[in-house]
Image (cartoon, helix red, strand yellow):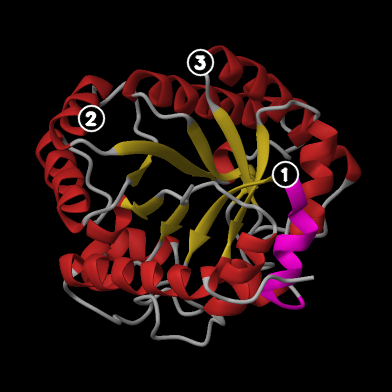
Amino acid sequence: MTNPIGVHAGCWGFDWTPAAADATIAAAARAGYDLIEIPAIDLAVLDPADTASALHRHGITPAVSLALGEADDITSPDPAVVGRGLHRLLAAVRFAGAIGAGYVGGVTHSAMRRYLAAPTTEGRDRAVRTLRVVAQEASRHGVVVGVEYVNRYESNLLNTAAQARAFVEDVGEENVVVHLDTFHAALEERDLTAGVLDAGELLGYVHASENHRGALGTGSTDWQAFLRALLWAGFRGPITVESFSRDVVGPRSAVDIALWRSQWDDPDVVAAESLTFLRAQLDEARRAPVHH
């Protein structure tokens, strides 16, 4: 059994009007990906039926992701802010159910921003309780919820696989998993292998992203060590390419994810080359001697 290989829709930008959604889904399918990761839409603005129709036409499997912000941070002491976070997470689950996606992941545990204070036990507890409610609703839709730990500049709560695993264990629902992104892990783990080992059997989803978020194979990531660790651990979940360009996503999104320089300008080329690179690296990892 091989891992499904996905690509984040943001490779082509974050516009999700019906025409843009169709073009992005078509591009991902044309490049040869098994899966496309779609940012959760605002159900009050866009109809998920358009996305579902495009996925059916182009024959590709969806996943859904989002990142909470300051206005809907479920660690907040303000019940209204936590309530908005719960609403947004439940809406993402409904969106996933409507388009046939079995996964909702991303920064689901706190705001994705620079915090100016250490996390509190009370804030963590609020996040755990909220994710438990979300997971219970997600189970009714056949959806797995992923908790993506991110670097210290984009969350104060979960920065390592060990922290994410402990958080997932405290949520205590079978459909909640650890989501590992190599970009963030490269900043925070001893090495990428440690992240895989610490997540253990709770690892459910992977973002394959270079240390500089450029095209795969153009940075300092030790892909062989990482992919061998995944294989040795028996990981069979999706591995989704995540590469963004300032030239493509537009100025607002570029500021949100700190894309201060452009590393490529053709998403079709980057998507195709990253897929070729990742498949070749996986093939090489599978031929490596068995780890003991």
| Camera-nearest residue between 64 and 61 | 61
Q: Which residue is mark 2?
A: 51
**Horizontal side, residue 281 vs residue 125: left or right:** left
Q: Which residues are magenta?
A: 190-201
Residue 53 x, y percent position in the rendering: 17, 25
Q: Residue 195: within the magenta? A: yes
**Horizontal side, residue 266 vs residue 279: left or right:** left
Residue 141's disc is 3
Q: Residues within 10 Å of mark 2 (few under 14, many from 20)?
A: many
Q: Residue at x 72, y 39 (%)?
A: 76
Residue 149 x, y percent position in the rendering: 66, 55
Q: Label 1 amino acid?
A: Leu
Q: Is residue 39 above or below residue 281?
A: above
**Horizontal side, residue 162 vs residue 108: left or right:** right
Q: Is residue 267 above or below residue 98?
A: below
* Helix, strand or loop status at disc 1: helix
Does any portion of residue 114 appear in the rendered image?
Answer: no
* Helix, strand or loop status at disc 3: loop
Report the quarter where the C terminus lies. Answer: bottom right
Q: Residue at x 28, y 52 (%)?
A: 33
Residue found at the far right of this picture: 121
Q: CA distance from mark 1 to mark 2?
A: 29 Å
Residue 66 x, y percent position in the rendering: 47, 42
Residue 202's disc is 1
